[in-house]
Amino acid sequence: MHRFAVCVLFAAPLFAQAPAIPADLRFDVASLKPSLPGGRGGGIRPAEGGLRYVANNCSIKTMITVAYRVKPEQIVGGPSWLDTDLFDMEGKAEKPSNGDELHVMLMNMMIDRLQLKSHHEKREMKMYALTVDKDGPKLTPHDPQNPHDIWIDFAQEKFLHLKLTATAVPMDYAAFRLAGLMDLPVVDLTGLKGNYDFTLTYTRELPVGFPEGGKINGEDPDTSGDSIFQAVKKQLGLELKAQKGPVEVIVIDHVEKPSAN
């Protein structure tokens, strides 16, 4: 089994349930510079220990999507280099910090170093509406007497078969994480308040380009099990409905290209 954990980092302007975090938190030391040519791999993540946030071979647009917790199509405007140019970033905190604090530091670094100015709008676009199924939700409210960082753990039990375990997750963030597994933004229309614990086991579709008759370790890929749509309905008591509707977007008003430190 392959496991990878995602510690949820979010900011109060987007998620109403976020705890009160000082808005002026900043990294003690921050570096943002163009990536070296020919670099391999890439991504952005908090490092273990609560002291650093790092990115390698990462576009500024990707960093903004992480900072604002939206899909790339929800970032509107800005110059073409937001998508094409790659950068390395490292932010170091003065002391171990929780996920919420690190995220505020990340947002402030983006604003300070890029002179980033933006505003939020609602725009009509294709999306999935996350609603409560007719039989009601099958979610466990998180015990407020057991404080816990909002946490999502993914386990790939075998090829195509994944398990998502969520702890203390609000529904608007659950919608964002589901959107990361799908082709469109997901908008929370459940009306459910508070934070929840749940697990979701589902089977992905074969990836685009997988050869017809292809094998995994000499065997046909196992495509049995619930799709993500079926799993959300059967296991969570929720429903994903494809439709057009108002989706929050981040409009880039001003951004400056970072140079080497």
Image: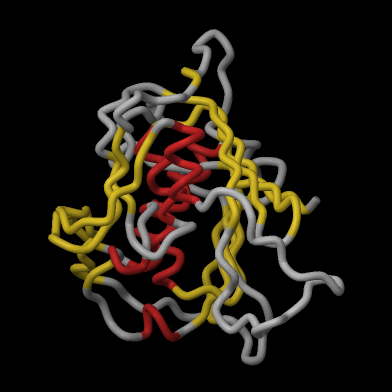
Q: Which residue is drawn at 49% across and 12% down?
A: 144
User: Residue 257 appears in which quarter of the rendering?
Assistant: bottom left
- Please state the horizontal and vertical placement of residue 159, each as a whole percent of the image: 72, 62
How many numbered marks does the figure carry? 0
> Does residue 23 appear anywhere in the picture?
no
Q: Give the residue furthest to the top.
A: 145
- Image quarter of residue 165: top right
Residue ID at (50%, 20%): 140
Residue 203 in view of the camera: yes
Left-right relation of 198 to 176: right
Identified at 35% across, 24% down, the residue is: 136
| Residue closest to the eye, 189 or 158 | 158
Q: Residue at 22% x, 74% y: name it.
A: 77
Horizontal and vertical percent position of residue 232? 45, 41
Quadrant in which residue 44 is drawn:
bottom right
- 44, above or below 98, in the image: below
In this view, which residue lies farthest toward the bottom? Answer: 37
**Taking 199 as reference, is 72 above or below it?**
below
In the image, residue 8 sits, relative to residue 84, either above or below, namely above
Compared across the picture, whether 72 is left or right of 103 comes to left
Q: Position of residue 133 (x, y in %)?
A: 33, 32
